[in-house]
Image (cartoon, coloured by chain):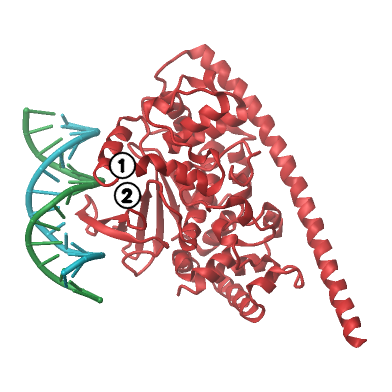
Chain colours: A red, B cyan, C green
Amino acid sequence: MLAHVLIYIYVKMTWTAVEAELRRVVEENRRLNGMLDELTRSYNALYHQLLQVTQQQQHPHRHPDHHLTMNSNRSSLTQTHRTTAALLPTPSSATATATQQFLEPHASSTAQQQTAGNDEAGGGEESPPALSSAGGQGRMGMAQDEMKAPARENNGEQAAADQLPCRKPRVSVRARSEAPMISDGCQWRKYGQKMAKGNPCPRAYYRCTMAIGCPVRKQVQRCAEDKTVLITTYEGNHNHQLPPAATTMANTTSAAATMLLSGPATSRDGAMLGHPAAMFHQSFPYASTMATLSASAPFPTITLDLTQTPAGAAGLLHALHRPPAIHPAASPAMPFAVPPQLAMYLPQKAAPAMVPTATAGLGLGARHPSVMETMTAALAADPNFTTALAAAISSVVAGGAHQALSTSTPRGSGSGDAGDNNGNGNPAPASAAPTSRSPPRLATQSCSTTSTT
DNA sequence: CGAATTTGACCAGCGC
DNA sequence: GCGCTGGTCAAATTCG
């Protein structure tokens, strides 16, 4: 009898917690919907402005200079592939296309094909199915063309890419690490080392060996100014399934890049008020200090700087776990897409992985501690964060990840998902309300990093 | 002995 | 055209 009463009380409490969480999620969802409407309206306005400008100017080669703001880059790069906004199907898809094109001509062409049935094939190069399909299929599709060109033939592909106005984009991660190379879950084989100009430290070249013919390369180099800073630059798309550890890093970079692409540079542009960039930047003002995008020729490069102030790093981590909703695979309704380049890191199974209210960080960290070591390094200096981290570890150790997922412990452990969310590494937007950046979230993120140290 | 790393050579792009 | 630089290759070497 007593057991029944206890069970009843337990269920009651749990239900109350669930209800509270549900209300919060609904509220957040409403807020995001409003944001989405706002974005759509802004894009419509911008689209018409762009059309007007295009009609007025009629300049085929408008932006020969690569050193432009991100806005300019997008437009110029887009125009390089196709003839300006006249081809842009709809404001929303156009934006996605522009973003994709900026980073990956291959995928952009696909996106264009899908949206407008236009088969320009992105300036002549082959156009794999790419990101059109959600998650891993998209990635695998993207890699198909590259699979055709193992080893040597990659040169040919690269040569073809070289002819493109927009070469393969890169994702660069700056992090403090004593290790010669950060562990990102993939297997790499060193194939070269060079002394780069202006840096006493050699630059090492690695290629992914997790699959035959995987075209992904990465460069590792220590920062000249601060040799404790390790700069890792990724290039290319994997043609194979990524281990969860790899997807972790991937999610980090992809989320940051997504945020970035819609962010800093554009927000500087007054005309872009209402742009998702501006909006996201309002939410994550620190992002501009943590991530930068450079389209300086020939590689557009997204740089994630995890070496800066702990507060900023923590903020970035917050942000990194927020944008999943803007990933096309996860939320096709959003008007802008994750960069295909970064999509290589995205989870193979996007939808199932999107566990609501789950904080990616915990799952990531719980599974692959070493992956987040760079962030750990950046964050370790913050005492408050360390405290939160310790709390998170305690809760996880005590309750277990899955229990943490259950709503029996309303907020704190509720943010933890040590489960499959990893594949995605991103929490549902509902759990990522800017206003509800609760310590548990921080803690869970830190948790992922702790195990690395 | 096979796999991984090292390292000098080669090639292509770019600026002058 | 020439030199510089980044990126890659492949033979030699090292490692497990």
Residue A323 visible at all: no
In the image, what residue type sits under mark 1? Ala
* Left or right placement of residue A309 versus residue A443 in this view: left
Residue A234: x %, y % from top left: 37, 51
Q: Front-most of A339 and A265?
A: A339
Mark 2–mark 1 distance (CA, rounded to whole Å): 7 Å
The residue at the point 41 percent across, 44 percent down is A143
Task: Reply above or below: A336 against A319.
Answer: above
Q: Name the residue under label 2.
A: A213
The residue at the point 38 percent across, 64 percent down is A182
Q: State yes or no: discs 2 and 1 in contact (Cβ < 8 Å).
A: yes
* Left or right placement of residue A324 versus residue A204 in this view: right
* Secondary structure of residue under mark 1: loop
Q: In which quarter of the image is the N terminus of chain A?
A: bottom right
* Left or right placement of residue A153 versus residue A299 in this view: left
In the picture, the disc for residue A149 is: 1
The residue at the point 60 percent across, 68 percent down is A418
Chain letter of the residue carrying label 2: A
In the image, what residue type sits under mark 2? Gly
Residue A124: x %, y % from top left: 37, 26
> How many residues crowd around disc 1 within 10 Å: few (fewer than 14), some, or many (20 or more)?
some
Q: Front-most of A296 and A241?
A: A241
